[in-house]
Image (cartoon, rainbow, N blue to C red):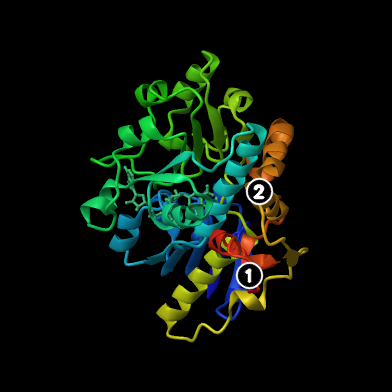
Amino acid sequence: MKILADQNMPLVEQYFSDFGEVERFDGRNLKPDQLIDVEVLLTRSVTNVTSELLAKANKLSFVGTATIGIDHIDTDLLQDKNIAFTSAPGCNAVAVAEYVISSLFALSQENARPLTGQTIGIVGVGSIGSCLAKKLKALNVKLLLCDPLKHAQGLLNEHVELDELLAQSDIVTFHVPLVKKGPHKTLHMMDKVRLNALKPGTTIINASRGDVIDNSALLDLMEAGADLDLVLDVWENEPNILTDLLAHVRYASVHIAGHTLEGKARGTQMLYQKLCELKGVEASKSLTDFLPVPAITQVAIAESFTEQDIARLVHTIYDVRRDDGILLRHLESDGFDSLRKNYPVRREFSTLTVNGDGSQLAALGQLGFKLTN
Ligand SMILES: NC(=O)C1=CN([C@@H]2O[C@H](COP(=O)(O)OP(=O)(O)OC[C@H]3O[C@@H](n4cnc5c(N)ncnc54)[C@H](O)[C@@H]3O)[C@@H](O)[C@H]2O)C=CC1
Ligand SMILES: O=C(O)C(=O)[C@H](O)COP(=O)(O)O
């Protein structure tokens, strides 16, 4: 069996070589000829799986994307062609939630404004939004949640309409899929009108898809002197982003919010599990077979600790400012995709065990750290 996999997908040889020969491809430059005789195609978000790409795919029976987002895949086409498909729902939800939490603590430190008491609006309350909400409940913040689809299904009681959420929140973070049309479209959900209506001092975090915010309208607003704190991981027209916007962004990164070692590896594993299911074989390999021991595994904490102590703990594992530095310093010379390809190893909070006593400790467990007691 011929298996074609994105060059930035970890552990493919380890998981898939029992099925056949693995070949790698450059995600943004896959050509139809490369799909001749390929049975399994494993992609990430940068490969558009369209009828043009599949024009010569004579043996393709399975397409998997090791991502949560599926806006790059023509799923109707795959269904028409009877090609099995899976994505990796939730694979990097923890990673994105931790990216947001790292950003919140960094801003709180730099703005000398504690998180406690602030109102945080989460737009899109699926895998990522709900994982984030659960973690944030440990921090005494007020949460507002907006997800009209879940609300309509009876799965979210406390839904707040987007415009109300924008008016009431100090910080707004987006976790919606890219939906280009229909009543719940998210393309330019933050258009010129909504951007202009934001309260001065609002923080906007986008780690969903770049097109959710009209980047040109945002640039115009920032150039006109708007007082907003921007944390952007995703951009319109990646990899050729609106570089003028960078100067106005507090933390700018190259679409890496989900790129923990665990998040990416979980994505590969989920595709492996699906292929095993389709082939009727046992999925015997698991993440623990492959993930290395992290550099720091244990830390002790005093019985009583402050928000600053939690921030230090969070930033011991991941400080978003490390990624901001990478983008601003290297974008022109290295390019967006090269920075993504060479992204330094990042681990999740759960790799750190916190030793301590006291009633406050549970909050660290809720944030995702491991506890001994
Ligand atoms: N920056 C990064 O590295 C990553 C970005 N993502 C992006 O984040 C998105 C969300 O991921 P998940 O939470 O796992 O997806 P999900 O599908 O579990 O949740 C998305 C939620 O958004 C809601 N939603 C849809 N349209 C909406 C609207 N107009 N207003 C408010 N809510 C709406 C849905 O009802 C759903 O509950 C993905 O589709 C992907 O595009 C995902 C992983 C990593
Ligand atoms: O899961 C998603 O959706 C994402 O956006 C990925 O985490 C990042 O995409 P890649 O380009 O690394 O596939």
Residue in front for this viewpoint, 47 or 342: 342
Mark 2 lies on residue: 311
In the picture shown, does residue 327 fall above or below 156?
above
- Residue 317, picture quadrant: bottom right
| Disc 2: CA contacts within 10 A as few (<14), some (14-19) or many (>=20) | some
Spatial separation of the CA atoms under disc 2 and disc 1: 17 Å
Looking at the image, residue 366 sits to the left or right of residue 24; the answer is left
Query: The disc labelled 2 sits on which kind of residue?
Result: Ala
Helix, strand or loop for disc 2: helix
Residue at left 47%, top 54%? 137
Mark 1 lies on residue: 371
Residue at left 22%, top 57%? 154
Looking at the image, residue 289 sits to the left or right of residue 116; the answer is right
Query: The disc labelled 1 sits on which kind of residue?
Result: Leu
Q: Position of residue 217 (x, y in %)?
A: 44, 22
Q: Quadrant of the C terminus?
A: bottom right
Q: Is residue 35 visible?
A: yes
Residue at left 30%, top 49%? 158
| Residue that extends furthest to the right in the rendered view of this protein | 295
In the picture shown, does residue 21 fall above or below 227?
below
In the picture shown, does residue 366 fall above or below 172?
below
